[in-house]
Amino acid sequence: NADDVFLVDTNITPEATRRLVNDIKTITDKPIRYVVNTHWHYDHTDGNQVFGPEVTIIGHENERAEILQGVLKNRLTQEFQNLPAQIENARTQGNADRLKVLEAYQEQLKETVTTPPALTVADHLTVFRGEREIRILYLGRGHSDTDVMVYLPKEKVIATGDFFEGPGTGALNFGFHDEWANNLEKLKVLDFETVVRGHGEPFKGKDQIAYFQALLRDLWNQTKTLHDQKVPVAEAAKRIDLTAHREHYRNINGPGFQEATIARIYQVLDQRGGSN
């Protein structure tokens, strides 16, 4: 912006976020004044603590509530419980590179303090910085119930977090897959050319939205049918066949899908009484 920097997402640890801040300083000497979390997941929020009171952290109202309820603290506890076994496994296998990464990650986690946004958004918030208009939009539940887009209408650029990752399927073991597909319609109507996604390089074009909707709906419908037939999760994961979408998602090599994703859809269906 004319006078400051507006940052989308922090990072997986405070140390990684400090490196990000240093990288930004090689581009501009303007201060960071705003940070937006596109959703609550730790790889987008665990660097929030790095920023002082002069920086306003923005996120969806559900994100603040869920962080205060302990969702990130619980994940952090689970990571600390899991890391020793992973470190020992890397040491046993003689994988020096992975061992180094895991040990560094373990040390970095020790300083992590889960930090919620101070300014929350329900549906939308518009921030004006000089000549730039920045719209923060909640389009409904998708990858999580906290997804917000950061949209620059003049520049025709949108940062979508993990709500829409274009050429990649992203992590599907989260979210509300049927609502996700429907809420992507709201993304289609926005006038943008460039997508800055939560993982991977930016890309241009909207074609991928329809492909992703089709994948989500097929995944949901197949899984719901198996759920209604009371097929166990592990068996259902083997039966799911998304090869019809292989042209657009090259990571789909054949029948079968990630069991954690199927378990998540079963969980949502159970919470709804299996009727939707």
Image (spheres, rainbow, N blue to C red):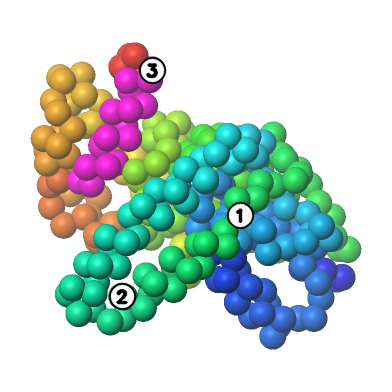
Residue 36 seen by the camera: yes
Give the image quarter of residue 229.
top left
Question: Tag 3: residue type?
Answer: Arg
In this rendering, would 76 be left or right of 262?
right
In this picture, which residue range is highlighted in magenta?
257-272
Q: Which residue is mark 1?
A: 113
Lower position in the chain sequence, tag 1 or tag 3? 1
Give the image quarter of residue 186.
top right
Characterize the local packing of mark 1: few (<14), some (14-19) or many (20 or more) Cα atoms within 10 angstroms: some
Are the residues tagged 3 and 2 within 8 Å (C-beta)?
no
Regarding mark 2 in the picture, which secondary structure is present there?
helix
Q: Residue at x 81, y 51 (%)?
A: 127
Characterize the local packing of mark 2: few (<14), some (14-19) or many (20 or more) Cα atoms within 10 angstroms: some
Q: CA distance from mark 3 to mark 2?
A: 41 Å
Eye-nearest disc, 3 or 2: 2
Q: Residue at x 75, y 46 (%)?
A: 118
Q: Which residue is mark 3?
A: 272
Q: Residue at x 31, y 81 (%)?
A: 97
Question: Tag 2: residue type?
Answer: Arg
Regarding mark 1 in the picture, which secondary structure is present there?
loop
In this rendering, would 72 be left or right of 157?
left
Q: Which residue is mark 2?
A: 98
Question: Considering only vertical position in the picture, is 75 above or below 107?
Answer: above
Question: Considering only vertical position in the picture, is 111 above or below 214?
Answer: below
Eye-nearest disc, 1 or 3: 1
